Amino acid sequence: MITLILNSLLALMLELTLNFSTGINTAFAQVVGTGPAESPVTTSGMLLRMGVMFVMVFMIFQVLVIKPQKKKVQDQAKLASDLRKGDQVITTGGILARVVNIEKDVVTLEIAAGVRVKFDPSGILRRIEPVVVPG
């Protein structure tokens, strides 16, 4: 579905770009005096086409970059607010740890027996199910 929409938008942008460049060539040819006797391309017409292209580029940028980044930030904030003592987590560096203490801007993690490190909540990638080692 997304691929179809992106292909349609890219085809439309390509068509507008070709129309825009053809309009410039026609306008230049009319100035020189060798072009067809068509109506001249006005500056407002070219600006309108450029405006449509800028709006389409902004929409594509919004869908492909801004919305996913916004969702990622919201998910990270939700994860940080939902952390509880005893949760098993994995950090952005790949360290498996258990949450020992939660303060306002610092989360203390235990990565081994007696080894505790302090992390910024944004350094926690995700919560994981506790790992049970048979033995």
Image (tube, helix red, strand yellow):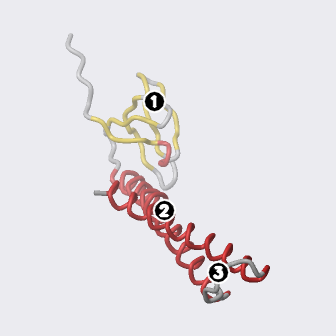
The disc labelled 3 sits on which kind of residue?
Answer: Pro
| Residue for point 33% across, 43% down | 85
Q: Nearer the viewer, residue 21 or 81?
A: 21
Q: Nearer the viewer, residue 105 or 29?
A: 29
Mark 3 vs mark 1: which is more N-terminal?
3
Under circle 3, the secondary element is loop
| Residue for point 31% across, 39% down | 87
Is 28 on the left or on the right of 7, as rendered?
Answer: right
Residue 17, how many percent across, how many down?
A: 57, 67
Establish if 123 lies above or below 36: above
Tell me the number on the disc at residue 118.
Answer: none
The disc labelled 2 sits on which kind of residue?
Answer: Ile
Residue at which label 1 appears: 94
The disc labelled 1 sits on which kind of residue?
Answer: Gly
**Of labels 3 and 2, the one closer to you:** 3
Q: Nearer the viewer, residue 91 or 26?
A: 26
Tell me the number on the disc at residue 36.
Answer: 3
